[in-house]
């Protein structure tokens, strides 16, 4: 093997690793966060947890990514350790699919059909199809599918290039001598562990081992302990993701480590014990790519079958390593993390929602976008509750309800800070077009949610002032405020519902009602001035009334902004003023009709 063969090998390795990364990222994009939601929800039974973990890992081609996601779920308090254990066990099975695909590249036959079935034979065709789609298609989903095809093709071409480059190593005694040393189980396990820890992918390290098989210098006696070490090395990624997480997140990462370590130790002990009594003849043979895939699968399936019934012990072992706090022993620990608040506005729910914004989810942007939207929906609910409570205070003031509004306003402020920072970090990721639109909507809307809660606080303050000074409006003024307040309550309701459901039809109802609210605001001001001139209203009450109706109008404006964000989500240029001006100037009979309907509904007495 000369210098240029070495360069070819390194180039093949680079293509192989890049193709694997490209394939995994594209598969995650195509899933649109749905696979991760399946991980989160379909984990009621142990067998279902294992099946889901294996299936999702097989689809995204990364047990490390699956395990990191699970650690994030546990850290956010939306998954229990028992559920996490099942998924982690399944992930180890799912990751073996890659080795079987790579093993197919080693098929050797003169048959045309058999050769055609080799991944290295049809991958150039996939590459051409992928390039064609990328060049001529503008749809985001099609481009993601094209990236999957290209990623697979690059992966296989890299594998083939790497295998061809290392073939001359079969004639290098020094190289074969090094590989022979790995027949020592401890040295082999250490080599596999270090390689996988550096690559942070057991699939990649197994693929490299399969490529080296082409030299004929690796026997099963050396390959088997290397594969065992690779299963332990893949735990490094999960262990790193557990750093800085909650105690339960650290325990989830440890479950992954303990499963692989215990499974490897048991498998090696039993295997070599039997081998000492009844020698396995296949260990003396040269390893093949399919043989390595078989060992990889047999080990992980066997370990899963043996340890699944004892997953509870794995959880206990992890809990012993990361010991329980006094609060956990009393049964109160983690309530905040688990979101035990039964009502949306309960502080436990606030914390639980915010804890879902786990940095680990940023590694799977499609799911992070969905999590962000769910948190924003919670934020919208808090803002709506604050506004509803403030409107009720105007008619019937109470200190308890006043404090509730202030608490909600502070919670919404906290949501804006945390969610805003998270969305900025998420914006730096490579997002699918649909996810990019969703991110844009969220960034525009969370500021409006926060301002609505601020106006709710202002309204509560005006109600507090009236209560403290025992001020009271005239009967006619109260009737007008009730109509105005009803319109504001209605526009907040339909705005938040349209945001929750992403209902564009409902979002189109907001602007006609906002037009009516503007008219109500102007009319009430005129009537107030008349009453003031006739001495039916005091200057002090006039200031309070002005504060109230000004905040009412501003709330409607922010509702309009939210609705416009939803309606303009798929446009590259977000310009609400131009959009609203276009609606108002156009001869839109439907819009004018909706304005008339709401005008009749909220007509002042």
Image: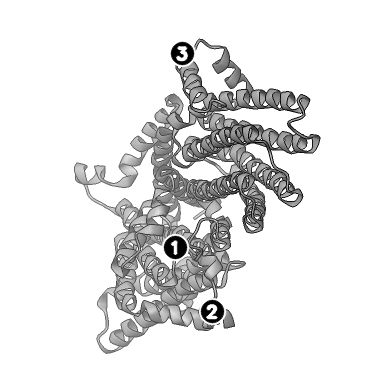
Task: Give the residue at mark 3.
Answer: 589
Instruction: Give the number of the mark in front: 2 or 1.
Output: 2
Residue bearing the label numbered 1: 202
Task: Between residue 16 and residue 580, name the one nearer to us.
Answer: 580
Label 2 vs label 3: CA separation?
Answer: 62 Å
C-alpha gap between disc 2 and disc 1:
35 Å
Q: Nearer the viewer, residue 337 or 323?
A: 337
User: In the image, is 355 to the left or to the right of 192?
Assistant: right
Q: Does residue 255 appear to the left or right of 301 in the view shown?
A: right
The residue tagged with tag 1: helix, strand or loop? Answer: helix
- In the picture, the disc for residue 328 is 2
Q: Nearer the viewer, residue 56 or 34?
A: 34
User: Residue visible at 50% across and 59% down?
Assistant: 343
What residue is rendered at 30% in x and 64% in y? 48
Mark sitting earlier along the chain (2/1): 1
Of the residues tagged 1 and 3, which is closer to the observer? Answer: 3
């Amino acid at each position: 093997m000369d210098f240029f063969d070495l360069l070819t090998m390194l180039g093949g390795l680079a293509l192989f690793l890049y193709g694997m990364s490209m394939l995994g990222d594209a598969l995650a994009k195509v899933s649109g966060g749905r696979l991760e939601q399946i991980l989160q929800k379909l984990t009621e039974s142990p067998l279902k947890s294992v099946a889901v973990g294996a299936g999702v890992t097989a689809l995204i081609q990364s047990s490390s990514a699956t395990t990191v996601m699970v650690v994030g779920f546990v850290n956010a308090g939306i998954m229990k350790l028992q559920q996490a254990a099942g998924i982690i066990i399944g992930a180890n099975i799912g990751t073996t699919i890659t080795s079987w695909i790579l093993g197919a590249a080693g098929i050797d036959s003169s048959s045309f059909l058999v050769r055609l079935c080799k991944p290295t034979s049809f991958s150039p065709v996939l590459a051409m199809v992928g390039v064609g789609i990328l060049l001529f298609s503008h749809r985001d989903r099609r481009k993601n599918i094209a990236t999957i095809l290209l990623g697979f093709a690059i992966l296989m071409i890299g594998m083939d290039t790497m295998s061809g480059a290392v073939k001359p190593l079969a004639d290098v005694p020094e190289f074969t001598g090094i590989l022979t040393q790995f027949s020592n189980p401890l040295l082999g396990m250490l080599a596999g562990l270090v390689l996988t820890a550096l690559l942070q992918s057991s699939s990649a390290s197994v693929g490299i081992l399969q490529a080296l098989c082409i030299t004929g210098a690796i026997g099963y006696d050396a390959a088997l302990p290397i594969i065992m070490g690779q299963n332990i090395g893949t735990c490094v990624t999960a262990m790193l993701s557990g750093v800085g997480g909650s105690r339960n997140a650290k325990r989830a990462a440890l479950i992954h480590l303990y499963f692989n370590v215990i499974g490897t130790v048991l498998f090696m002990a039993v295997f070599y014990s039997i081998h000492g009594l009844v020698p396995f003849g296949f260990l003396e043979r040269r390893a093949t790519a399919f043989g390595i895939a078989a060992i990889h699968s047999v080990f992980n399936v066997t370990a899963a079958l043996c340890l699944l019934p004892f997953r509870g012990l794995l959880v206990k072992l992890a809990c012993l390593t990361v010991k329980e706090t006094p609060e956990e022993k009393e049964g109160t620990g983690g309530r905040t993390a688990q979101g035990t608040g039964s009502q949306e506005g309960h502080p436990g729910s606030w914390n639980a929602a915010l804890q879902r914004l786990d940095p680990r989810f940023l590694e799977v942007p499609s799911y992070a976008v969905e999590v962000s939207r769910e948190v924003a929906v919670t934020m919208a609910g808090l803002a709506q509750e604050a506004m509803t409570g403030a409107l009720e205070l105007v008619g019937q003031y109470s200190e308890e309800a006043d404090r509730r509004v202030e608490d909600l306003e502070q919670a919404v402020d906290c949501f804006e800070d945390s969610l805003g920072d998270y969305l900025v970090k998420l914006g730096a990721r490579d997002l699918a077009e649909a996810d990019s639109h969703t991110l844009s909507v969220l960034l525009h809307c969370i500021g409006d949610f926060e301002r609505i809660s601020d106006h709710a606080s202002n309204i509560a303050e005006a109600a507090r002032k009236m209560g403290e000074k025992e001020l009271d409006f005239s009967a006619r003024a109260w009737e007008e405020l009730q109509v105005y307040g009803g319109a504001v309550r209605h526009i907040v309701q339909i705005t938040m519902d349209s945001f929750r459901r992403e209902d564009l039809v409902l979002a189109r109802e907001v602007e006609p009602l906002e037009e009516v609210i503007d008219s109500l605001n102007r009319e009430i001001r005129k009537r107030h001035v008349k009453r003031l001139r006739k001495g039916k209203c005091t200057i002090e009450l006039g200031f309070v009334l002005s504060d109230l109706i000004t905040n009412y109008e501003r709330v409607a404006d922010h509702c309009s902004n939210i609705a416009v964000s939803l309606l303009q989500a798929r446009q590259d240029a977000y310009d609400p003023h131009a959009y609203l001006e276009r609606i108002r100037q156009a001869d839109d009979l439907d819009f004018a009709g909706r304005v008339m309907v709401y005008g009749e509904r909220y007509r002042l007495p």
